[in-house]
Image (cartoon, rainbow, N blue to C red):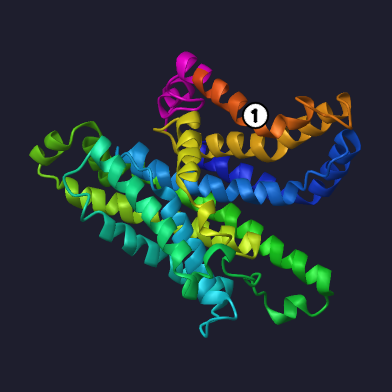
Amino acid sequence: MDRNSRLLSLAALAVALYPALPLLDWAAEALTGAPLQLERHILSTLIFALLTLALYLQVGQAGMVQLGIAAFFALGAFGSGVLTVEKYPMQLGFWGALLLVPPACALVGACLSGPCAGLQGDYLAMVTLAFGELTRVVLLNMEAITDGSRGLNPLPVPALPEFFLRHLSGPGQMHAAFLALYYTALWAVVLVYLCCRALGRAPLGRAFGALRQDALACASLGLSPNRLRLLAFAAGAGIAGLAGVLYATYLTTTAEPSNYDFNLSTMVLCAAILGGLDSPKGAILGATVLIGFDNLIAPGIATLLGRLGDAADPGLWGTFSSWRLMIFGLALIALMRLRPQGIWPEQDAGHRGAP
């Protein structure tokens, strides 16, 4: 069985095991005293895995140092808000935003490649960092459109066919809408992963590899580095915009623009490095490890340690969430020292039988 078949099998397994998540929630709450809400955390992980795959295309495939991926994530979220909230006349709903926003974000990414033409390394990193911060500030100050720090809300849940909802009550309809969002995110990750795998074997993927190794040598082969950067920027921005649409719908709000800052871009880059920059499967694994640690493991440990401390003065035990990033940072340093290629790099495929 090849890797693509294995991934599809894992996706099918996720579909099959979904009904068991409430039982796992019950067991975790009985053990730790804190509900884990696995359904919501897994959906969040899928969304950030999609965002990490977008960065993999730009950094891992094309070798561009991209520090502004959060900007396209924000544009996807706020674009979805503008197209769906009651404040605006469009009100296209989730499915309309899902079709229109990613291509619009891809167009913005293609436009960004213009000022970045000929730039690489630290200079490209500074331009993308500046674009990310500029986008955040613009969204924050355009209160007439984005509602500033309040963000746009409420975003509608995915609409489902009337015949499907006819026999469902209010809570049942909400859960059905959540299922639609969950499976949309799941299959989006699967499809983007398969596209990334196919790209690695295609002539365009080899052209990206040449660009990653040396832009001058890439040009000497008759390839256009600027055109390749445009394609990488557009593809990554479109996928990040898709993740933004899913994220805003998941929260039912765009959230405030400050949530899409440089720290978010850094976190996504860390996830890609953690899994393996040259590997799409590593990008998914890195996002799963990072988001899973932050959303599942850290709160559970904080609850357990809080029980061991003094309830009136929890002190160090009760503040685990404030220094969890230190633990993750130390783990990342250790990984870079012991396994700099990441947890699941592409070159490991040769030991398992590359296709």
Q: Is residue 101 above or below residue 20?
A: below
Residue displayed at 51% across by 69% down: 80
User: Is 110 placed left or right of 193 in the picture?
Assistant: left
**Residue extending furthest toward the front:** 313
* Boundaries of the magenta span: 334-355
Q: Residue at x 84, y 41 (%)?
A: 34
Quarter of the rendering occupied by the C terminus: top left
Residue 340, horizontal then vertical, whole percent: 43, 20
Q: Split into 4 quadrants, where in the image is the N terminus?
A: top right
Looking at the picture, tell me which residue is in the foreground, 10 or 70.
70
Is residue 346 shown in magenta? yes
Residue 114 sits in quarter: bottom left
Question: Residue, x 62% and y 70% (percent of image)?
Answer: 153
Is residue 305 highlighted in magenta? Answer: no
Residue with the mark numbered 1: 323
Q: What residue type is labelled 1?
A: Trp
Query: Can the viewer see residue 193 in this picture?
Result: no
